[in-house]
Image (tube, grey):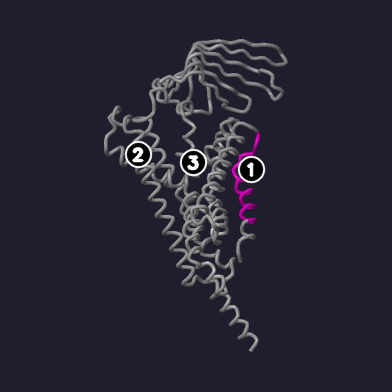
Amino acid sequence: MEGRDSSENIRKSLKKLLPGILDWYIIRQFLGTFLFSLVLILGIAVIFDFSEKIDDFIQKQAPTHAIIFDYYLNFIPYFATLFAPMFVFISVIFFTSRMAVNTEIIAILNGGMSFRRLMVPYLISAAFIAFCAFLLQNSLLPHANAARLDFEEKYYRSSDFRRVNVSSVHRQVYPNVYIYMEQYNRISQSGRNFSMEKFNDQGMLESKLTANMIRWDSTTGKWGAWWYYIRETDSLGERISSGRRIDTVLNVGPDDFTRSPEFVFTMTNSELLDYIQVLKAQGSDEIKLYLNEKHRRYSSPFAFFILTIIGVSLSSRKIKGGIGMQIGIGLVLTFSYILFMQFSSQFSLKGDLNPALAMWIPNIIYTFIAAGVYYTAPK
């Protein structure tokens, strides 16, 4: 008898966890409002972007097919992923406020459903959107970004951005090994007035190679230094050598000297992790940018849950300002979150803030905000 009662209680508990009519209603409202706001804002963004760039498209004779399929078809997922947390927050605020104004929230709570249980369909919807955004960010979006950036370089960027010669190239290629070129030519894959300096752990110069020119040899996969001069120092004294040509094994390729910071957005997750290992082997300071992107991709999905909890907690009560006031508060919180993310990213790139901590600080802070507004929400 006791065993039957126990199994019956378990069955009832499991039944309570399964989505009911009210859950599906909230999920439909959530996802429907999210898709509607996404399509609306994306349409406005495309119109404004096109009006801004149409002169450049005409001047550079961009084909209509390329504008539609190479640029805007890839611009839409980039913009949608970038501002998806804001769209989620606005969607939650909008339809939950409307439910509160129509006293639906009061009726639900008076019907015996707890506020915690009310959060379940919201979190299910947020989990679905976060999962889709994560897959999009790590698989489809990098390829879309590559096509979009390639189009911008051909038909939108200024000639300075696409210049053949790159001046004053500084780069760390190994730990304590630095190279410099006065000018690098993208077409000939060669650099002028090249130097490579190697320091010991105490910061003392061990060797320096200078050459009139360095050129990439595609057959051997090495850089050749022409008309070189090498000066080496150690405990035994100083040694000097020179010659017409010498091969140098640098842990960089021709494209590494001309990549823009946006290159990080064109890499899938596996490519990003592999490239981080290469930068670690080089000891390059550029690794901060790629570590930021790595941790951002894992931290950003949590923003959907945090902003959903804040949105439901704020909009589930009636206030004098109505829906407009709640949407205004929501926009302020969302933009402050995005702004905070940008600030912490810059502190990591320009300062000593750990990239993982920089990308997770906004989530940590707004988790406390979410907890505060959740416990003050009407139960």
How far across and down, in percent of the image, does residue 308 sit?
54, 56
Q: CA distance from mark 3 to mark 2?
A: 23 Å
Q: CA distance from mark 3 to mark 1?
A: 22 Å
Please name the residue that numbered disc 1 is placed on: 357
How far across and down, in percent of the image, does residue 64 sit?
27, 37
The image quarter in which residue 337 lies? top right
Answer with left or right where residue 202 lies relative to residue 53.
right
In the depicted structure, whether residue 331 falls above or below residue 348: below
Q: Is disc 1 surrounded by few (<14), some (14 to 19) or many (20+) residues within 10 Å?
A: some
Give the residue drawn at x 39%, y 22%. Answer: 187
Please name the residue that numbered disc 3 is placed on: 271
In the depicted structure, whether residue 237 falls above or below residue 357: above
Please, what is the three-letter code of the amino acid marked with disc 2?
Answer: Tyr
Closer to the N terminus: mark 2 or mark 1? 2
For the magenta stretch, what is the residue range? 352-372
Closer to the N terminus: mark 3 or mark 2? 2
Q: Secondary structure at mark 1?
A: helix
Please state which of residues 105 and 56 is positioned toward the viewer in this rendering.
105
In the depicted structure, whether residue 57 falls above or below residue 127: above
How far across and down, in percent of the image, does residue 320 sit?
54, 57
Q: Secondary structure at mark 2?
A: helix
Q: Nearer the viewer, mark 3 or mark 2?
A: 2
Count of labels in the image: 3
Please state which of residues 177 and 235 is positioned toward the viewer in this rendering.
177
Please name the residue that numbered disc 2 is placed on: 71
Q: Secondary structure at mark 3?
A: helix
Please state which of residues 19 and 45 is positioned toward the viewer in this rendering.
45
Q: Give the quarter of the figure containing the N terminus.
A: bottom right
Residue 348 belongs to magenta span: no
In the depicted structure, whether residue 252 falls above or below residue 366: above
